[in-house]
Every structure is written in C-alpha cells, then in structure tokens.
Amino acid sequence: MQGLKKMRMPLIFLLVALLFPLFTDNQYYIYVVTLAFIYAIAVYGMNLVGGYTGQLSLAHAGFFAIGAYALGLLTVDANVPYWLAFVLALVITTVIGTLVGLIALRTKEHFFAIYTLCVGYIIYLIIYEWDALTGGVRGLIGIESPAAIGPITFDTGISNYYLILVFLVLTVIFMKFLTESIVGRTYVAIRNSEELAQTIGINTMKQKLISFVISTFLAGLAGALYASFVRFIGPDISYTMMTFDFLMYAIVGGFGTLFGPVVGTLLIVILTQSLQFMEDFRMIIFGPLLVLLVIFYPRGIVGGYQMWKMKRAYKKKQRSVDQGSTYEGGD
Amino acid sequence: MDVLLQQLFNGLTVGSVYSLVALGLTLVYGILHIPNFAHGALYMVGGYITLMSMALMGVPYFIGIAISIVVVGSLAMVMERLVFNPLRHAPPIHDKIAAIGILLFLETLVQLVWGADYRAMPTPFADTVSFLGITVTWQRIMIIVAAVVVMILLQLFLKKTMVGAAIVAMSQNREGAFLVGVNANKVAMLTFFVSGALAAIAASIASPINLVYPGMGHLVILKAFVIIIIGGMGSVPGAIIGGYILGLTESLGATFISAAYSDLIAFVLLVVILTMKPQGLFAQKGAH
C-alpha cells in the first residue's frame, strides 16, 4: 500500500497515457506524443550515463542514428525480417557502444566530453559522406513499420503509439530497478567522486562501461523505433544539435532523476510543436533556460518537486516535534 | 611541386585561423578549467559583427574588425560574469551544459536577426599575387601575417605587462596568485575578453575566404578542442603549434588522401591520441 502511494503520480500518468488516444481523433497529436516517447527512451540513456554516473556523453545522437540506420539498412537493403533486424540493430549499436566506451572511458571529465563530442561528429560525417551505404544527404526512405506480432499489427498511428508506450514503460521500470539497486548507488558514488568510489572498492572503469553501454543500448532502441515510426531518416538525426536537444530534455526534466526524462521530453516536445512558429527559434528561450536551470535548479523539474516535497515533509515533522516538546513541558 | 607548395600555403592559412581560435580556448581553460563550448559561437558572432558593420554602417574592413573585437570581447566578459562566475563551485558537468546553452542561444539569436543565409564578406585584399609558381590572394597572405602579429602581441602582453603576468600567474597556481594579491574576478573577466577578441579576429580574417553563416563555428570549435588537447590544455605555445600542425595536415590530406573526409582527419587524430594517451599529449602535472 505504501509503495502504491509512493508511485501514485507515475501511475496516474500512465493511465492518462493509456487513455490519451481514446480522447483525441487528431492523428497529429498522437504522432507528436509518440515521437516524444521515442526521444524519452533515448534521453533515459543519456540520463543514466550523465545524470547518475556523471559522465557527459555527447555522442548520444550518434548512437541513436546508428540504431536507426542499422534498422533501416537491414530492412530496406538487406530485406531482413523486421523483428530480427530490430534485434540486430540493438546488437550492432551495443557492440559499437562497447568499443567506443572501452576507449572513451579511459579519458575523464572534460576530455571525455570532448572525446565523445568528436566521436559523435565522426559518426555524423561518416553517415553524411558514405553515400553508397547510407544514402548520404538524401537519407533512407521507405523503412517499413514494425511487423505484426501474431494478430497484433502496427500499421496505424495508434498501434504504434501503444507499441512505443510499452517500450517506454519497460525502460522506466528497468531504470527504476537499476537506479534503486546497489548498482545505481555505485553509479552515484562514481558521480560524486571517482577517487572515493575507488577507495571503497568499486571497479569504476567496469561500472562506467556498463552504464555507458546501457546508455548506448537505449539510444539504439530509440533510434530503431524512430526509424520504423517516422519511416524516413537523414544524417541530421546524428548531428550534435540532436545530442544537445536530448541534453536539454534531460536537464529540464531533471538530470539524475527517475522521471526527469519523461517529464522534460514530453513538456518540451509538446511545447515546441504547439508553438510551431518557434520551431527554428526555440533555442532563444531554451538556451538561456538551460543556463538558468544549471545555475539555480540543477536537478530540473522533477528534482525541484522532490526537494519541495521533502522540505514540506521535514517542516511537518518539525512542527509535530515542536508540539510534542511543548506538551511534555520541555527539558 | 606546385601543388604541394600551394597546399602548404593553404595549410598555413587555415592553421593560422585554427591557432587563433585555439589560443582563446586554451587561455580560458588555463585560468578557469572550463572547456568553453560556446567559444565557437563567439567566433561566429565575430564574423557577423564584422560583416554587418561593413554592410550596414559602411565602415572599412579594419574598423569592422575593431568593432567586432570590442563587441565579442565584451560579450565573452558578460558571459563570464553572468554564467561561469556563479557556477565556479558547481560540479564540472554544469559548466559544460551552461556553455552549450549559451552556444544554442547565440546561434539562434544570430539566425533570428540576420537569417540563415550563407554570406560572403568583401575584403580590400581580393587581388591575387603570384610568386614561386603559386597564385594566392592577398587575403591569405594577410591572414598569415595578421595571425603572427596577433600572436606576438599576445605573447608580449602575457610576458611583459603586469596584467598579462597576472593571467599567467593564475593559470600556474591559483592560490599562489591570490596570495600575492591578484584579483581573481578581474583576471577572469580579462581572460574572457582576450579570448573573445581572439575569436573575433580569427573569424574576421577567415570569413572572406570562407563564408559567414550561423553554423560556421561548429567545425572550428571542435577542431580547436582537438588542437588544445594535442598541444596541452592551457598551454599557449601548444595551441599555436597544434593549430599549424592541424592546418597543414588537413590541407595536405585533402589533396593527397580524400577531400570528402578531410574534416575527419582532425577527429581521427584526436581519437588516436586520446586512445593512446588519455590525458592528452604534454599533460601538465597537477592540471585538471
């Protein structure tokens, strides 16, 4: 019962998400929310390695694109059955992620950020220039929708919506167990001080690598879903700006919080889509917002909310203690 | 032979620009240990201010550059005051995120004000000159000369003036500098001003041979990062030498290996270097 109460907000949120398509006939709204769900999965990856483990990986859009292109190329050019291609895309992204992680994580802090930024740019350049494989600037067209699983087909917007919602919920549940386990605490320990973590016997390289690989896996998962949902991909999805977008979603929602990525992504994607005229100029507002958030609210909306709740609970407790002490006449 | 000479010359031109940008970056890193991702945006703004003061106010090229130096230098100073100073005790990840926020803001602002078109910058040095069997524009010669002059002036400033010495002192030992009475705030602001000014000069002299557009800083800043990692974060001579090495490697690589992947050379170089030496070449003792 206590657990249920604690999870009240997320459960209400899930209920709204489940019922949402029943209340709107507008395909466009469903499309936007689905897109936000996909991005949220990728942002979870960034949140894990950046927010929990404290390693700012700026190659995230690159891995997102690798997942998307792997799925696209396997289904369009190689005619691999969809779900097999889907699994292969995840494997490919994770393997590349592991290789990059093995080398990248030997560098620390600023070097790591710069290194991954460059890795991301290399991925972008390769996708852009390797015309024969990736279609270069024209991109890949006509990627198929997810294939039917038994009687369930995914050829409509609503069915895709539920499919992606399932993946998102699985991601959140996985993250909940991961971050609340000893492993999650290990990551936070590394974020707070890598040297200290080492002195209490944590193999920081191994833990950082695992966290990085999971993060690339989630980026690849989001990428693969994106490719089959939007059905067209271009080199833009691997560009640095995409990484910065992910970063912004994470920061606004709350870097290093469990529900930050969903909150941030949904809020900003819906906000920018509903203010269409802002599409190109959204950074006029979001750029300074990012700066203000890291200065004043480094833990974002969710972190701020948690802080407020904790303060309130503390004050309540203080008050009852105060009353208690007067009742007993003090000491 | 002519091709080689021509490419060496081009490499020197490009290298000069890289060196100037990397110098600004390395100065800021030396003092505050901030990898300023927004430096590329300063570079871009520098190009625009020069171009726009020439186009809108009709001032000559060099006056345009002077205006640009003042504007971008002040912009960098404001950045330090409003953003990096409040964040000086925050975890290092916050500085990087804030810098990215500034970068996104400046780029969009420029795009909003002046549009996303690619623009050419006019220059009084458009004529060509031939010597040793190669033909180059005066602009390219001007770039090389200007870069060398700026580097010498910077070196004199850092070595011969009190203020410059304070900058060097703070990058060598922060606490030591405080003990002998260096004002940290002033030095930090000044460093940002110099860094912004260098970016403005680099952009203004490079723009006539490239183009001016909101995304013009992206590649340059990434390469400047590569340079300061190669040359040692915070090292002034390292930034200069690294800039020329990269410029020459790139222009030779573009001719003799592949033009399409010439931009890749810098990043492959970086990946190789960091793979073998995760602390970067010439890692300074005690620097973080």
Image (spheres, coloured by chain):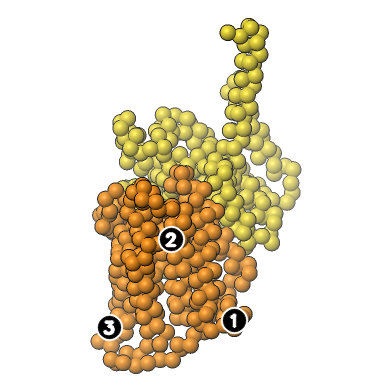
Image x and y of residue A110, in percent: 39, 51
Dots 2 and 1: beta carbons under 8 Å?
no
Residue assigned mark 2: B191
Write down the chain letter for disc 3. B
User: In this view of the protein, which residue sits in the foreground, B286 or B277?
Assistant: B286
Q: Is residue A201 left or right of residue B101?
A: left
Image x and y of residue A291, in percent: 55, 51
Image-quadrant location for residue A308: top right
Write down the chain letter for disc 1. B
Amino acid tagged 1: Ala
Name chain A's colour: yellow
Spatial CA distance of label 3 from label 2 is 38 Å
Furthest residue toward top: A328
Work out whether mark 2 precedes mark 1 in sequence or the reverse, and give the earlier one. Answer: 1
Image x and y of residue B9, in percent: 32, 82
Work out whether mark 3 precedes mark 2 in sequence or the reverse, and give the earlier one. Answer: 3
Residue assigned mark 1: B55
Image x and y of residue B51, in percent: 55, 78
Q: Is residue B282 left or right of residue B80?
A: left
Name chain B's colour: orange
Dot 3: within a 10 Å radius of its alpha carbon, few (fewer than 14), some, or many (20 or more) residues?
A: some
Q: Do pointers 1 and 3 mark residues of a single chain?
A: yes
Q: Say if B192 sits above or below A35 in the image.
A: below
Q: Is residue A187 left or right of residue B80?
A: left
